[in-house]
Image (tube, helix red, strand yellow):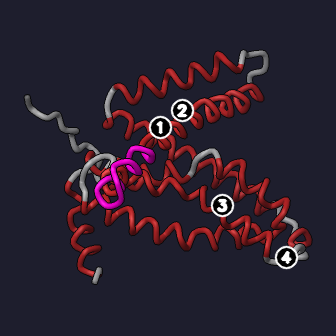
Amino acid sequence: MTQATLSRTINLPAAVFLIIGYVIGATIFILPGNLAVEAGPAIYIAYLMAAVPAVLACFVMAVIGSAIPASGSLYLIIRDVLSPMLGFLYLWLMVSMAALVTPLVAFGFADYFSHFYSGLDSGIVAMTVIALIILINYLGMEVASGFQNLMVIGFILALLIFGIGGLTHADPALMKPLIPRGWSPIVVAAMTAYFSYAGVFIIAEVAGEIKTLAEPFRWLFFSVLP
């Protein structure tokens, strides 16, 4: 019996868009406002602090994905380096999180959608979104990657429009005091904000579907390691 393998359809630009798409998720539109309640105007400092370990995690995930060029690299390395039981627990933890997060995001989309089209049943809208995502993924990684690229472009445009629009109406007086409650809330906010960057882990999970265009980067990472 032959062993089925995944086709490598994700090139370097698509991999970059994939990471951006997973980082720019629902949290970037919701979480900053909630964290700013405690951290105050210095919330941007919390995100800068959280970006430091996130950048390091990018390199770690790239190394893991290059060393183990197979989908589910994190599961494989946990299974082989630590123990099969921990790999099993990690796998089902990820499956459970996906099963929980997917309907939450779908209902979040339905709430936003109802703001423009009131009267629609949020449950039907959420189920339609889930069915659409399942269909896109069923059509293959190439189709899903193209759809992901379109969503990323939309996310970036939305952030630019609201960001530039917000800057034109910014009131510098609201930035004072910059740190109203000390550094403790900022550090706590930074730890929470790190999860906004957690999408960087996806690159190791789909390593088996990335083309060999990333081979030069594999050489770069391993050449600087001791």
Few, some or many residues within 10 Å of mark 3 (<14, 14–19, 20+): many
Q: Quote the CA–CA distance across marks 1 and 2.
A: 6 Å
Span of residues in magenta: 78-90
First reached walking from the N terminus: tag 1 or tag 3: 1
Q: Under tag 3, what secondary structure?
A: helix
Image coordinates for residue 216, horizontal then vertical, percent? 22, 68
Image coordinates for residue 3, horizontal then vertical, percent? 13, 35
The residue at 44%/47% (across/down) is: 90
* 83 inside magenta stretch: yes
Do callouts 1 and 2 mark residues in contact (Cβ within 8 Å)?
yes
Q: Which mark is residue 179?
A: 4
Question: What's the amino acid at mark 2?
Answer: Ala
Image coordinates for residue 61, horizontal then vertical, percent? 38, 62
Q: Which residue is mark 2?
A: 99
Query: In the image, is 53 to the left or to the right of 85?
Result: right
Which of the two residues, 61 or 152, is positioned nearer the viewer here?
A: 61
Quadrant, the N terminus = top left
Question: What's the amino acid at mark 4?
Answer: Ile
Q: Which residue is mark 1?
A: 95
Q: Closer to us: mark 2 or mark 4? A: 2
First reached walking from the N terminus: tag 3 or tag 4: 4
